[in-house]
Image (cartoon, rainbow, N blue to C red):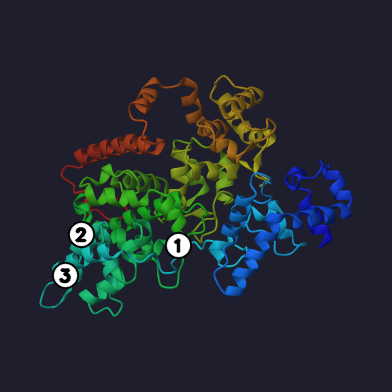
């Protein structure tokens, strides 16, 4: 207690006690001096009046107002002695209590607010934090519920008090605000007993009471498509959606009599979706990947646009036509597999043997085909999208894995030289002026500007707009020569519409070329109907 009192007194101004000036150091080193100072304070007349007033109030049972008493006591002798304590604080009730220190008393609440000078502890403010996590999604507001319930009552107002699958599209569009070709998937999600009818109560239970109403559109689609107990989407989950798109979209009407090509179109759309969005490459599309991609906007665009070829993301029929025709040209025996020698012929023998060997070693991606030494249609879609648009992130990752021979995550000059040696040999065979690897390496370093000059990382390539040209230099002679000559027509075409990707431009040019060849064949064959031919001649 002596130490506490001593520490508090060191904060006092000696003039307040009408004593000669005493240094703080003397107070700290002399406990006896502290006792003398406190005795001097008790001997002051104002102190006696204050203590007597507090005792009388306590005996009488009246409310003790220390501040008022203290202020009155100070008012009596204010001309002769300034108060030792702030007017908003209570005096100490114990001679050796640290509560007598002005430093501590100024930090405490007024006793009048607490009802007693013995307790100077302020009650903390309690702030109520609203709930921010909901296990089953945030419940919709009452206004939102009432607004949708009125729409639901209107649409389900029929003798059956429910809707069949062919009548459910209006609910999907007007109430759920989803693309119309999701109506079948949504209907089957609610009609778990497969009775062929969704009642008003069943729809409200799933859409309103299940908090689907307050979810964002990506989460809604994810919940509708995924199977029970799963936390991801697979390729199978998208088949009903693309199948309904084929059945209802006006731009795909001409395919309704050719089921084999409907299946191929659906497969191509799904492969493109997973190639672009499933960055982990495990065939399991997560909600995070779905939200980060462009699939939702592409679905909405396809639902609004009558010309399916204007929906360049995933759904364009022209893009499917180009991919499938390229595959058909290379698959000479039509067993729906492509071997190493067939892939060498791609792009008029544009690729080197070494890069094709790396592809068939399954370095960039494990083949989905179960036939040894052959790639299937899905594998070819991944390859072709990577080859024709080397500026996209999936393509950069695809070719990076091919060049990274030791799999250590960096491309070294030795690895790049290994692939360029065949390019150099091909240039010599074609009587082209060879470019030494030392000069090529300097050019690559200037284009990529890597963090370290002795290697190139995947991050370096993704941060450069010229990364695709690096891959072309290493293993695609045709595109390497085109880059060196800088075709002014292509440069002007890119500047006219910068929103188009390299794949969009390639697919457009190739579709025109293929359609012109088909027109010539049709003319030479008279009035032959291409759609009546067998699968061996698809277009």
Q: Foreground: 106 or 63? A: 63
* Foreground tag (3 vs 2): 3
| Residue, disc 3 | 153
Q: Is residue 337 visible?
A: no
Tag 1 secondary structure:
loop
Which residue is found at the position 76% from the left and 62% from the top? 95
Query: Residue 174, which numbered label?
Result: 2
Circles 3 and 2: CB atoms closer than 8 Å? no
Q: Characterize the local packing of mark 1: few (<14), some (14-19) or many (20 or more) Cα atoms within 10 angstroms.
A: few
Q: Foreground: 157 or 84? A: 84
Left or right of 227: which side holds 425? right
Query: Residue 386, which numbered label?
Result: none
Residue 5, horizontal then vertical, whole percent: 79, 57
Residue 140, horizontal then vertical, whole percent: 32, 64
Tag 2 secondary structure:
helix
Q: Is residue 219 visible?
A: yes
Left or right of 114: which side holds 519? left
List the single residue furthest toward the left.
159
Quick one: label 3 or label 2, which is nearer the N terminus? Answer: 3
Q: Characterize the local packing of mark 2: few (<14), some (14-19) or many (20 or more) Cα atoms within 10 angstroms.
A: some
Q: Foreground: 6 or 526? A: 6
Q: CA distance from mark 1 to mark 2?
A: 29 Å
| Residue, disc 1 | 132
Q: CA distance from mark 3 to mark 1?
A: 31 Å
Q: Foreground: 254 or 390? A: 390
* Count of labels in the image: 3
Quick one: label 1 or label 2, which is nearer the N terminus? Answer: 1
Left or right of 475: which side holds 386? left
* Foreground tag (1 vs 2): 1
Quick one: label 3 or label 1, which is nearer the N terminus? Answer: 1
């Amino acid at each position: 207690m002596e130490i506490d009192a001593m520490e508090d007194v060191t904060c006092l101004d000696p003039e307040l006690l009408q004593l000669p000036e005493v240094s703080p150091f003397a107070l700290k080193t002399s406990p006896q001096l502290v006792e003398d100072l406190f005795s001097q304070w008790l001997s002051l007349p104002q102190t006696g009046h204050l203590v007597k007033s507090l005792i009388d109030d306590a005996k009488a049972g009246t409310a003790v107002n220390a501040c008022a008493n203290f202020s009155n006591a100070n008012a009596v002798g204010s001309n002769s002695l300034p108060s030792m304590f702030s007017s908003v604080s209570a005096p100490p009730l114990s001679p050796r209590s640290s509560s007598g220190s002005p430093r501590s008393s100024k930090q405490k609440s007024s006793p009048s607010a607490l009802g007693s000078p013995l307790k100077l502890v302020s009650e903390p403010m309690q702030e109520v934090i609203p709930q921010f996590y909901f296990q089953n999604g945030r419940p919709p507001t009452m206004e939102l519920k009432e607004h949708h319930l009125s729409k639901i009552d209107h649409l389900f107002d029929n003798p059956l008090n429910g809707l069949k699958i062919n009548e459910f599209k209006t609910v999907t569009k007007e109430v759920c605000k989803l693309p119309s070709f999701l109506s079948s998937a949504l209907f089957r999600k609610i009609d778990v007993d497969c009775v062929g009818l969704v009642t008003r109560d069943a729809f409200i239970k799933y859409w309103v009471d299940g908090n689907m109403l307050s979810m964002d559109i990506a989460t809604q689609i994810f919940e509708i498509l995924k199977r029970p107990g799963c936390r991801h989407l697979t390729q199978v989950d998208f088949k009903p959606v693309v199948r309904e798109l084929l059945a209802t979209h006006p731009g795909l009407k001409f395919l309704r009599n050719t089921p084999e090509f409907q299946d191929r179109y659906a497969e191509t759309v799904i492969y493109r979706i997973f190639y672009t969005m499933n960055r982990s490459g495990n065939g399991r599309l997560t909600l995070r990947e779905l939200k980060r991609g462009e699939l939702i906007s592409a679905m909405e665009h396809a639902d609004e646009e009558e010309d399916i070829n204007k929906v360049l993301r995933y759904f364009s029929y022209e893009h499917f036509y180009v991919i499938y025709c390229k595959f058909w040209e290379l698959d000479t025996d039509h067993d729906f597999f492509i071997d190493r020698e067939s892939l060498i012929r791609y792009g008029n023998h544009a690729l080197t043997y070494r890069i094709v060997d790396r592809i068939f070693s399954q370095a960039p991606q494990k083949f989905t085909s179960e036939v040894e030494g052959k790639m299937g249609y899905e594998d070819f879609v991944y390859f072709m999208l990577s080859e024709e648009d080397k500026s996209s992130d999936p393509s950069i990752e695809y070719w990076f894995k091919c060049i990274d021979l030791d799999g250590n995550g960096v491309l070294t000059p030795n690895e790049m030289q290994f692939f360029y040696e065949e390019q150099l040999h091909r240039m010599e065979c074609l009587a082209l002026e060879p470019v030494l690897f030392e000069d090529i390496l300097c050019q690559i370093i200037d284009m990529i500007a890597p963090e370290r000059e002795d290697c190139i990382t995947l991050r370096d390539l993704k941060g450069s707009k010229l990364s695709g040209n690096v891959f072309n230099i290493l293993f695609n002679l045709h595109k390497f020569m085109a880059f060196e000559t800088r075709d002014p027509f292509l440069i002007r075409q890119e500047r006219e519409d910068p929103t188009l990707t390299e794949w969009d431009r390639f697919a457009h040019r190739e579709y025109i070329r293929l359609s012109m060849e088909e027109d010539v064949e049709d003319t030479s064959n008279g009035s032959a109907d291409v759609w009546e031919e067998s699968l061996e001649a698809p277009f």
